[in-house]
C-alpha cells in the first residue's frame, strides 16, 4: 500500500503538494494601473466615462469601468452559436457567445468571445 502523503498524485493532484489545489477564495487586491488612461483615472484626472467616450479612448483595463459604474452593471447573454471545424482527429466543436453589458443609463457594450 502506498501512503497518500500529498505528494505527486496525492489529494492535491500532481505536483500541488500540501496546497490542495487552487480553489481558495479570491483576494481583493488594490488596482495597479498599467495604461496611461488607467493612471489618469486612478488619480481622478478623468472624472467620467463620457470624457473617455468623447475622445474614443480604448479602455483596456476592466477596473476603469468598475470604478465608474461598479455595482450598477448588468449583463445578459444574447446568443450562443455553436460552430464546428474539421481536424485530422475529427470534428472540434466551438461556441461563440455574444454578451451585452450596460447600466441602463446610456452606457452599453458588446462582448464577443469564442471558446
Image: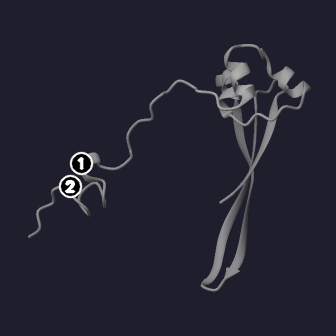
User: Residue at point 76% right, 27% down?
Assistant: 103
Q: Is residue 62 above or below residue 47?
A: below
Dot 1 alpha-carbon crowd within 10 angstroms: few under 14, some 14 to 19, many 20 or more: few
User: Residue at point 82% right, 28% down?
Assistant: 107
Image quarter of residue 80 = bottom right
Distance from disc 1 to disc 2, alpha carbons, whole Å, reads: 6 Å
Q: Position of residue 23 (x, y in %)?
A: 38, 45
Pointer 1 or 2: first along the chain: 2
Q: Is residue 1 above or below residue 4?
A: below
Q: Which residue is mark 2?
A: 6
Q: Position of residue 24 (x, y in %)?
A: 38, 40
**Which residue ends up furthest to the right in the rendered image?**
54
Residue situated in front as seen by the camera: 72 or 70: 70
The tag on residue 30 is none
Tag count: 2
The tag on residue 18 is 1
**Which residue ends up furthest to the bottom in the rendered image?**
88
User: Residue at point 80% right, 38% down?
Assistant: 109
Residue situated in front as seen by the camera: 37 or 104: 37
Residue situated in front as seen by the camera: 23 or 101: 23
Asked which secondary structure carries label 2, the reply is loop
Residue 46 appears left or right of 67: right
Residue 26 appears left or right of 80: left
Asked which secondary structure carries label 1, the reply is helix
User: Residue at point 77% right, 14% down?
Assistant: 47
Pointer 1 and pointer 2: residues touching (CB < 8 Å)? yes
Amino acid at each position: 500500500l502506498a501512503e497518500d502523503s500529498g505528494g505527486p498524485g496525492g489529494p492535491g493532484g500532481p505536483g500541488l503538494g500540501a496546497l490542495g489545489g487552487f480553489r481558495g477564495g479570491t483576494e481583493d487586491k488594490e488596482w495597479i494601473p498599467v495604461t496611461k488612461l488607467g493612471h489618469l483615472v486612478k488619480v481622478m484626472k478623468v472624472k467620467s466615462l463620457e470624457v473617455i467616450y468623447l475622445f474614443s479612448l480604448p479602455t483596456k483595463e476592466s477596473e476603469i469601468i468598475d470604478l465608474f459604474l461598479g455595482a450598477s452593471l448588468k449583463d445578459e447573454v444574447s446568443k450562443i452559436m455553436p460552430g464546428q471545424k474539421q481536424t485530422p482527429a475529427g470534428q472540434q466543436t466551438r461556441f461563440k457567445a455574444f454578451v451585452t453589458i450596460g447600466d441602463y443609463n446610456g452606457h452599453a457594450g458588446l462582448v464577443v468571445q469564442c471558446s
